Amino acid sequence: MKYPSPVVRLLSVFALVAALASCQKVNLATELGGDLIPAVDNINTFDTFLTVQTYNYPFAATQDSSRSVSTDIHYVGSVSNDPLFGQTKATLFLQLLPTTLKKPFGFSSPNDIIALDSVVLVLSHRNYWGDTTQQQQVQVFELGRNTDFRSDSAYQINSNNFTYSNALSGVKTFLPLNLNDSLTLFREKAANQLRIRLDNSFGDRLLRFDSTTVYGTDSAFNANFKGFAVVPGTTGSGLAGFSLSDTNTKLAVYYRYTKSGAADTAVTYFRFGTNAANANYIQRNYGGSELAQVSGDQVADPLVYIQNAPGTYTRVVVPGLAGLANSVVHRAELQVEQVPDPLSGKYTSPTYLYLDAFDAAANVYRTIPFDVTIGSSNVLNFANFGSIGFAGTDPAGSTIRKWGFDLSRYVQHVVNKTLPAYEFRLYSPFITRTNYSNTTTVSSFQVNPTYAAGRVRVGGGNHPTQPMRLRVIYSRL
């Protein structure tokens, strides 16, 4: 963890003095709601803003252990030039298995097969993040025979654990906005599909596999074919999300065979099942981006860059928090405002932002005490805590997202000297952990509905017009 230089610390002291000097009695209704202001506000209820310092960081691979499982949306695609966050490449690895294992397998007898018509990899499209009007390119490869690709393992999304080389397709170019189109195909009507035609030589391999051995068990089939790597091209402006467990995801093998002395056409499907492995590799490259220019130093940043996992975080320091006098805290809220950029409409914000605290004494990140709670349905109170952004306007009148993180109970304990003043971490995790104390059992909770998709730029502590700051409404004792 990096800390501010002595110069930055000195400047923060001046900022703190100025902030405390700005304390004023609360005489009018506030954005926080009139019910927060006691009837005696003209006498001893005050409203003040504490300045904060913000520092940008990319998550190291060892700091984010988010993993993909079969029910998650998996992404494929490329963001080749985001001025704020650089480049992203999303690669999908998956297995598709015979739907029924038997001897012989569901193909007609090899002696009856006339020829392969085609073999198509079909992915069930669910969403798209980015610019749908810019073409994407993908290519399908075969995983290496020695690759350890297991259905009982959940793989980290920031690590590439697999090798692939044998190309099973040419380069497929598609327009994302057309992925929702309906298609009329052999024996089915389909929509929301990405269809990638594979080389006929691969389909012939499947047709000619020994049905009494290769198709006898999942392990026998996997020994002869490890799975697919769906690899994006180097150009593109978004990420396409796919559902693996949906029946729309499949490998379709179309072929002709002899039936009762006449030629007939058939299709056999391979699908994703409980014994099929999956992984998603999300590769970030921040070189040349705005983020790269402001991260990794000890200078407080006026702009904060938050990207969904595997992504980034900002360290938030509130120098004046420990010095608050004992009082009744009616509301303490960390206020965060989006600072839009020209691509904000295409590269949208994460669904949720999240805030936790760094306990320097224990060297661990902690759940915000008392303000982040677990409800009866075993879900964190993200809405009440402030993780969900709301619509607002910036000084120029543009529509933006704002967040207000409720720290009231925690700050009350700080002013009562029953808890220390922590530093905070603002980020957009896929999975987070609850850790209320060193003796509490640590549990994992999903924060955002997906990983990979979502980024936002917000004002830092010293932003000239939209500063991040801690607002405190209190009554003196």
Image: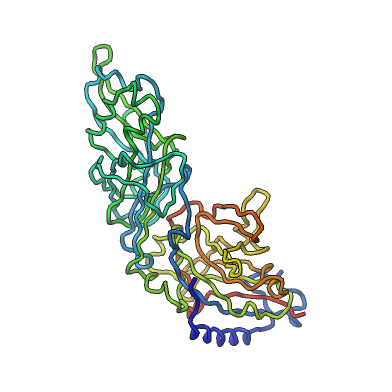
Q: Is residue 281 visible?
A: yes
At horizontal 35% and vertical 62% (from top left) the residue drawn is 285
At horizontal 44% and vertical 58% (from top left) the residue drawn is 310
Comparing 373 with 26, the one in front is 373
Rendering quarter of residue 320: bottom right
Vertical order, 413 against 71 (above or below): below
Comparing 122 with 144, the one in front is 144
Q: How many marks?
A: 0
The percent coordinates of residue 274 (x first, y second) are 46, 35
Vertical order, 112 against 426 (above or below): above
Q: Is residue 227 left or right of residue 116?
A: right
Direction top: furthest residue: 260
Vertical order, 131 against 218 (above or below): below
At horizontal 42% and vertical 52% (from top left) the residue drawn is 157
Rendering quarter of residue 213: top left
Q: Is residue 31 left or right of residue 274?
A: right
Rendering quarter of residue 191: top left
Vertical order, 12 against 390 (above or below): below
Question: What is the quadrant of the C terminus in the image?
Answer: bottom right
At horizontal 55% and vertical 75% (from top left) the residue drawn is 317
The percent coordinates of residue 403 (x first, y second) are 55, 66
The percent coordinates of residue 296 (x first, y second) are 42, 72
Q: Is residue 366 left or right of residue 8?
A: right
Comparing 225 with 139, the one in front is 225
The percent coordinates of residue 147 (x first, y second) are 34, 42
Specify how the rendered protein is coloured: rainbow
Q: Is residue 459 visible?
A: no
Comparing 18 with 396, the one in front is 18
